[in-house]
Image (tube, grey):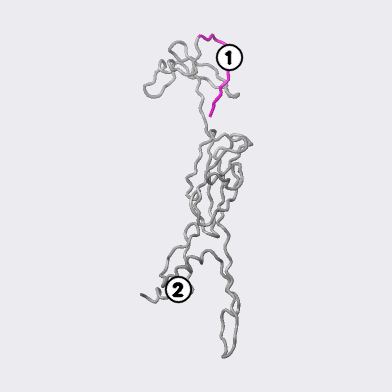
Amino acid sequence: MSERCERIDGYVPAEGRHGECRLGDCLRSFDDLLAFAGCCNYTSDLTDPDCSGTLARGATATCTIVNTLKGAGVLTIEKSCPGGAYAVGDTFQPKDGTANAGSAIACSASTTYTTTPGVAYAITEAAAGTTNLNNYTSDLTDPDCSGTLARGATATCTIVNTLRKFTVITLVCEGSQLYSSSVTFDGDVKSSLNHGDALPGTVTEANLCSLGGARYTGKKSGTYTGQVVISP
């Protein structure tokens, strides 16, 4: 065994991504292993001046070492909403199992969650406020959204909720041919495809005009008012 393995004086343990202790050096006995296991749970204060120096024969001194237990690990949970929120009152409640992990947060906000030392967490979310989660896609793949935090450690979990977007296409047909018409949707006026317009691949006007779905036949020329409801 080398001199390095024989001594642990002044040993400073390495820390992992979440502050956990890693056995990065040689330990000479089981007692040393126990000391190593506990050292990451405390801050150490050896500033007492009597903890170093020289004692004359017959002299006495007292060295006081202060070890303060570190607080539990703290996870910051951030909410990212590319494209914004569906409604002003939409908020999201982070969860760890069935328990709330911090407070409900809106887009671009954050909350903190104090974890239990040595106990694994796994963050999910529930709807809060006016939120309907079906209006969003949710991404909880941030690696810090699950794991175990050591005492005194911190991490940040970012949950991404992307607003779902839909496309509405209106076609007007005369028989099996496209017929260009003015279409107004949410105040935006556009023209539908016209007979002879370029179509992708082998698609024909007859193919498009035979589509099912929201199909209305027998209409005369004129102005029609309708309503489109997209349910998430």
- The picture places residue 196, in percent across and down from the top left corner, at 43, 17
- The picture places residue 149, in percent across and down from the top left corner, at 51, 56
- Of mark 2 and mark 1, the one earlier in the sequence is 2
- Mark 1: amino acid: Tyr
Q: In which quadrant will I find the N terminus?
A: bottom left
Within the magenta stretch, is there residue 230?
A: yes
Q: Which quadrant holds residue 133? A: top right
- The picture places residue 64, in percent across and down from the top left corner, at 59, 76
Determine the residue located farthest toward the right in the rendered image: 89
Q: Which quadrant holds residue 27? A: bottom left
**Is 52 placed above or below 122 here?**
below
Magenta stretch, main secondary structure class: loop
Q: Nearer the viewer, residue 207 or 71?
A: 71
- Mark 2: amino acid: Ile
**Is 116 placed above or below 50 here?**
above
Residue pointed to by mark 1: 224
